[in-house]
Each structure stands twice: as C-alpha cells, then as structure tokens.
Amino acid sequence: MPNTGANAYPSRYRWLGLLGSLALAAGALTSGALPAAATGPTLRASGGAGTVLVFAGLTVLTAAWLLLGRSADALPADVLPAKTLPADGRSTARTRWLAATLAWWAAPLLLLPPLFSRDAYSYLAQGAMLAGGFDVYTDGPAALGGPIAQQIPQVWQHTPAPYGPAFLLLARAAAPLADHPYAGVLLLRLTAALAVAALAALLPALARALGADPAAALRLGALNPLVLLHLVAGAHNDAVPLALMLTGLLAATRRHPLLATALITLAALTKAPAALALPAAWWLATATPPRPTAAVLRRASHPAAAGPALPAAGSGPDGLPPGGPGIRSGIRRVGNQAPAFPAFRTFRAFRAGPGHRLRCAAAVLAVAAGTTAAVTAVAGTGYGWVSALTTPATASSWSPSSGLGRLVAALAGVAPEGPVAAARLLGAAGAVAAVVLLAVRVARGRSAPVAALALAFGAVVAFGPAFRPWYALWCAVPAALAARTAGARRAVELTCAALAFAVMPDGFEPDSAELVLAAGGLVLGAAAVMLTERQLTFQERQPAC
C-alpha cells in the first residue's frame, strides 16, 4: 500500500503548487500584461475568468509554499528510503528535492506574456534605443516609437532608463526582437530563468559557507512565490544582479575579495542597490578564522571526551583552519552546545589587522572603479545612469514615505507635492542612518554581515520613494541565509506571501469589478487548499503501510 504518513506530505504539496502554477498560466493568457495588439491602446487586459484563475492559482501556490515549509524536515519515502541517512546526506537530498520542485513550479510560467508588470517591454525598448544610438538616460521610449513603444504605459513613455550600463548591454542583445514583443519577452525571461537557476545553486552553497541550513535557504530565497511571480513570470531584471551578488558573496567567503568586488560591481551596474553588498563582501573576505586554543588542542588529543561535531569558520577546504586530522577533529568537536547549523557568525574576535583591512579596502575600491569604467566604456552610455536613479519614483508612486507625505498633505489641506518630497527626503535620511547603524554593529561584532545586509536592503526598500513587491526580494534573498530561527523564517514567509497578492495580473491599478473577481479567485483557491488539507488530515489517521 502507498505510504500516507507525514513523509508523503511534501510530494502532495509539490503537486498542489504545480496546480497553482498551471492555474496562473491559464489565467495569464487573458489577464496578463498582453501585447498591445491584443489589448488596444489602453493596454488593459480583458480580465474576467482569467483574473479569477490567476488569483486562485496565487492562493494555491502560496499556500503550497507555506505548507511545504511546515513539513520542511520531511521528504517522500522514495527520496529518502534510508532512515539512517546521515544529517549532511539528508540535507543534500532535501536541497535537491526542493530544487526540482522549483523547476516544476516555474515550468508553466516560461512561455507566457509578462505577468503583474509591463516592465519587460520597457527593457526591450531601452535595448533598442541603445542599439539605435539614442541616449537612454535622457530620452524615453516615446523617442523610439514603433511597435515596442506602443507596449509601454503612458506614465513611462518619457522617462529615462534607471538601470546601469551592464543591464543595458543585456537589453541590447534583445534589440533585434524589439519589433516582436512576445519573442523579445521570451528572450528576457530566459535570461531571468537562468539567473533563478543560478540562485537555486548559489543559495545552498553560500548557506554551507555561512553555517546555515542549505535547504531552508533554498526554500526561502529561490522557491519563493515572489521569485516565481516576478522574476520568472514577470521577467524582471532583478534576477541577474541578485545572482551576481550572491556569487560575489560566495567568492568573499572563499577569500577572493577582488573577484567578489568585480561581481558585485557588475550587479550594481545592472541594478544599483546591489552596491550595498560591497562592504559585506569586504568584511567576509577579510575576516580570519579562530586560531586553535590550548583547550581545543587538548580536546583534539582526547577525541572521546569531545562533544558532537560543529562546523566552524576557517580557511581549510571544509571551513576549518588548516592542520592535521587531530587538530581539525578537535576543532570540529569543541563547542558541543551549538546546534547543527550554528547561530550568526560575527567574527567578533577574529578580525584581520587594520593594515590588512585598509589595503584590502583600497584594492576593493580600485577594482570597483575599474570595473565601472570598463563596463561603461563598452556600453558607450556614459554616467547618466547616476542621475537617472530616481526614475522609478513618479509623482504617483507609492511607498510608506510617499503615503505619509500624502496623508500630511490631506490633513493640512495643501497640495501633495511639497509634503511628499519632504517625506521622501526624510525616508532617504532614515535609510542612510539605518545602513550606518548596521555597519557599526557589524564592525563591533554584534551582527553578522549577511544579516546586516538583509536589514540594510529592508531599510532601503521600506524607506525608499517607490515600492514594488519584487523589491522585497533584495531583502528576502539574503534573509534566507541569515534567518536561523523559526520566528525569523516565519516573518520572511508571511511578508512574501502577503506581497504575492499586491499586484493585479496586468500590472495596472484595479477597479471595483476586478477586485470582486480577485476576491472570487481567492475564495476558490482557499477552498481547493482546504479540501486538500482535509484529505491529508483524514489520511493521517490511517495506518501507514
């Protein structure tokens, strides 16, 4: 008889998530960000049953992800037939199973029109403008005209590109398809999907280097509804810089600061927020492992008296300081009170000397400047992207700071422009202050670099002048590596789950009819999830055979 115990649940949730992804794909065919040929000049999708299907699929997919986290320690019996599999082998098996689940859930979203945003069409226009000799940092898509400019909402027709030259080089590669928007979007989505695959490989590797749970990092950082909805289905350009940033951080943990700097600078030249990772990479690359103490050496000579194994930060091939088997074994065993995946590594007492850090900082700055100059020269765009960084913040853009400014204006009975500008300036000051305070905490050994990086991204996103749901991934991806407690992981999960429902399928603000359709989809998806859970509860009462 089939096994219907708890270890059968994850496979059921994998199928449930696939059902949600298929419903999303079906609904996107009529309610997504369709080409202008299918929508007319308004660019609004017809919605209807498609909107219901999209929100039903959203509900099912998000619930499957949350339920999968609840049973994260369980895997189907055919994946782990041996109950005596060691902990590291079990973690590897869980990671592979979750990576395969990501492929399952992403596959139905690969051939669709864009979902939840029309930004992919703007990317095509910017690539075509660069190929046509336009200045993308002063002109908007309206200067280009033609079929691709017709795909872009009026609010963005005259706005310059807010992205760095590295991204524009990628966008220019899609320029030959600018007159065929659907084909161009597929090429951009292929790039984003490859970057998501890189995230799925990098997160477990970086988690091991930092002493975190690889499977938990993969589930929170890559098998995440926001990744599927906005990086895969939406083809957003955040996927590439996130992958480059993680690659740079991984290089930093392996003591390659200049390579890490070049990779993170490339990420920042794609999307500017990635520059926040440069100090974290510098700190990781220059942190030195603890030296064996006399107590460690005594334990090394008496292995039987030592406690259970403990991963430790170091420079050896498996994260330990170099030395003979006895020394390495003793270092593994000391600190027997620590869990399998230890808490944040702060490197408090193990920093390199000031001279070494200063020399490394100078080299990092030189490599960052050289990489910026080289990429800018190749792209031929100049440095206008620095002044264009505020492009995503229009007068109607929403964020906590912008909302506060509008509220003050409404209470005071004045025009909103002044209060909104003041609130955004206040938010920017708050973000800078938060980043500085986090840097001080890291320098004093009170916070781990990656945890501080996640919080710094969170501050920039929360206090910034404009907010989009996919911006939260800049915080969620490093948080997947830094969240070591159940409460922290639950906070990341619930935030991402709530943001998954924040945008309509075509990317525009909803009217009352669309809100009713969305609510109907939520109810339909919730009913499907409840029926599935009810069946599982019944099966749980049956004996496993």
Image (spheres, grey):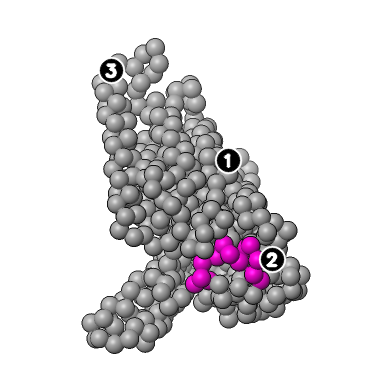
Image quadrant in which you'd find residue 204: top right
Task: Decide if residue 512 is in sight here.
Answer: yes
Give x and y (percent) for residue 518: 33, 50
Give the mark nearest the N terminus, 2 or 1: 2
Q: Residue at x 35, y 71 (%)?
A: 400
Q: How crowded is the residue under tag 2: few (<14 C-alpha within 10 Å), some, or many (20+)?
A: many
Label 2 sits on a secondary structure element that is helix
Sequence-first tag of 2 and 3? 2
Using residue 243 as the reference point, say whether residue 437 is left or right of it.
left
**Residue under pointer 1:** 326
Task: Determine whether, in the image, residue 332 is placed left or right of residue 397.
Answer: right
Would you call the spot at circle 1 few (<14 residues within 10 Å), some (14-19), or many (20 or more)? some
Magenta residues, start to end: 144-156
> 438 above or below 231?
below
Q: Is residue 115 left or right of residue 128?
A: left
User: In the image shown, does 430 or 48 lie closer to the viewer?
Assistant: 48
Q: Which mark is residue 128?
A: 2
Asked if the residue at tag 1 contacts the one at tag 2, i.e. Cβ–Cβ closer than 8 Å, the answer is: no
For the point 35% across and 27% down, the residue is 6
The x, y position of residue 450, in whole percent, is 49, 60
